[in-house]
Image (tube, rainbow, N blue to C red):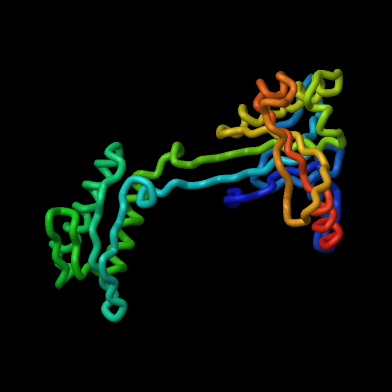
Amino acid sequence: AFSAFDVIYADTNIMFNGKRVANDWSTGHSIFRQIDFDNPFFVEFRNNKRWMRPDCIHFYGETKKIFDEAIKIDIKNQYKSSGRLDFDVHLHDKSKKDAYNGFCSNLKQAMTNGKIRGATAKRDNIFKNYPELEFEKQKKCIEEKHKTGSERCSVYTLLDWKYMDSSSFLKSSKKIEQDVSKQLCYEVILQKNKPGFIGNQFVIPCFYPSDGDIGSYIDKKTLYHRIFESNIDVFQANFAKIQEIYLNHA
């Protein structure tokens, strides 16, 4: 599976840290593709594939754990010498009430089956002198039982590099119309194959007075209306910063 913050596809054949980035030549071009990413960017006709190549796809994924969002654990005391805890359990999302009740019930059940001695429970959600190992075991049990695909937030961003001036994106032109259509085509293909939120960006080189700035977005309201309505951002990347990174790792 992809890491939390990854480039999963790039139309590139550069050297980085002494190694060639490209690892896939199946399209007839040198590209980088993470092993877990099945390349969907083609049109098939009579068993022949015509490949399309977006410049870069960035992935961000976040798993929302039930104990981070819906059920809160308030640890009052931690006794390291004995490996025990005093803690309260609170429900913050009523849609997860079954998980909350099941967790508290399992904690108490472990106390009454003879495996735990010395622990106490009050008002169903307050536990004292509870073994930390058993506590973690019961948390993991509930997390696995109530894990769903909807709790996985996947964000893909399509990046297309443009050697163009910022003013080019403020008005209509034949090239802009073609670039927008191509970018929306990438988006539809990716959305069909990788459910999640799809972001779209044109990236252009820009020079900044400070080396520390990575870049900035052009105000959406000023963009040509088709770019704006297609929800495509235009990012002005700090060209000096990019060159610095490239030259230091080439």
Looking at the image, which is closer to me, 37 or 59? 59
Which quadrant of the structure image shows residue 181?
A: top right
Q: Residue at x 71, y 28 (%)?
A: 186
- Would residue 132 be found to the left or right of residue 206 on screen? left
Residue 46 in sight from this viewpoint: no
Q: Residue at x 59, y 45 (%)?
A: 60
Which quadrant of the structure image shows residue 128?
A: bottom left
- Would residue 197 be found to the left or right of residue 131 on screen? right
- Would residue 148 be found to the left or right of residue 14 on screen? left
Looking at the image, which is closer to me, 136 or 231? 231
Which quadrant holds the C terminus? bottom right
Q: Residue at x 85, y 19 (%)?
A: 173
Residue 226 x/y as whole percent: 72, 19
Residue 243 x/y as whole percent: 85, 54
Residue 3 x/y as whole percent: 59, 52
Residue 166 drawn above or below residue 85: above
